[in-house]
């Protein structure tokens, strides 16, 4: 609830000062089997940008702040996908993105302006295509280990499956469900 309330409060403030252009709309691409839900499109300094708010607990906030540039690469890729589809389908004048981190425990905030290069956007779309290929074949993609693995509740399962070839997605899902019971 805190995350939703934080989003609503910030969106209302941006609307009140007249910079909010749209908010909370789904993004759908049937060909790439993509579903997303962006937080907002705002006009900042005369430029249209997509904004994403990430509320997180203190532990995640601190871990994320130690990442290169202070940005979680998964968040950057998620935001790049929003940027790509919004620019392609709704806002061709979109110039960049803003990522806004909020520490739910302390109220600390950090904001990052991000401008995507064409190559980075191409990599994100290629990743979507690759994931679709894995889904179609039913084989789990190879997982790269990153710093969040040590705090992930599925770390042991992931580690166990990490070097196994041709792990079926349905088997990995079944095992993850068994571990959460």
Image: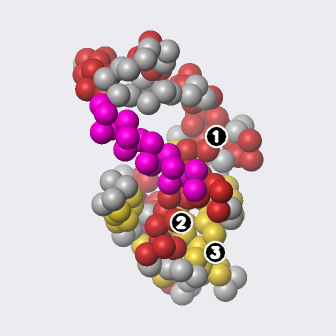
Give the colour scheme shown: secondary structure
**In this view of the protein, which residue sits in the foreground, 133 or 12?**
133
Could you tell whether 96 is left or right of 126 in the image? right
Mark 2 lies on a secondary structure that is helix
**In this view of the protein, which residue sits in the foreground, 2 or 128?**
128
Q: Could you say where residue 23 lies in the image, as x and y percent from the top left?
A: 42, 73
- Nearest-to-viewer mark from 3 and 1: 3
Say which residue label 3 marks: 95
- Nearest-to-viewer mark from 2 and 1: 2
Question: How far apart in space, not on screen, are marks 3 and 2 (Cα)?
Answer: 9 Å
Q: Could you say where residue 57 lies in the image, as x and y percent from the top left?
A: 53, 40
Magenta stretch: residue 124 in it? yes
Quadrant housing residue 153: top left
Disc on res. 172: none
Disc on res. 64: 1
Residue drawn at the location 42% of the way across and 52% of the way down: 2
Q: Could you say where residue 22 lies in the image, as x and y percent from the top left?
A: 44, 78
Residue drawn at the location 50% of the way across and 46% of the way down: 127
Question: How far apart in space, not on screen, are marks 3 and 1 (Cα)?
Answer: 25 Å
**In this view of the protein, which residue sits in the foreground, 44 or 139?**
139
Question: Tag 2 or tag 3, which sits nearer the N-term?
Answer: 2
Magenta stretch: residue 158 in it? no
Q: Could you say where residue 152 lies in the image, as x and y percent from the top left?
A: 48, 26
In the rendered structure, which segment of residues is drawn in magenta?
122-138
Disc on res. 83: 2
Question: Tag 1 or tag 3, which sits nearer the N-term?
Answer: 1
Question: How far apart in space, not on screen, are marks 2 and 1 (Cα)?
Answer: 22 Å
């Amino acid at each position: 609830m805190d995350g939703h309330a934080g989003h609503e409060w910030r969106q209302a403030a941006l609307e009140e000062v007249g910079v909010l252009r749209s908010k909370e709309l789904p993004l759908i691409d049937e060909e790439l089997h993509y579903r997303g839900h962006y937080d907002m499109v705002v006009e900042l300094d005369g430029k249209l940008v997509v904004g994403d708010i990430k509320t997180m607990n203190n532990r995640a906030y601190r871990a994320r702040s130690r990442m290169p540039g202070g940005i979680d690469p998964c968040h950057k890729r998620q935001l790049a996908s929003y940027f790509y589809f919004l620019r392609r389908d709704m806002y061709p004048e979109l110039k960049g993105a803003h990522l806004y981190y909020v520490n739910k425990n302390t109220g600390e905030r950090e904001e990052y302006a991000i401008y995507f290069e064409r190559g980075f956007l191409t990599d994100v779309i290629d990743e979507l295509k690759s994931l679709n290929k894995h889904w179609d074949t039913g084989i789990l993609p190879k997982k790269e280990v990153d710093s969040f693995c040590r705090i992930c509740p599925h770390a042991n399962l992931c580690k166990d499956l990490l070097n196994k070839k041709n792990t079926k997605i349905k088997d990995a899902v079944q095992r993850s469900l068994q571990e959460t019971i």
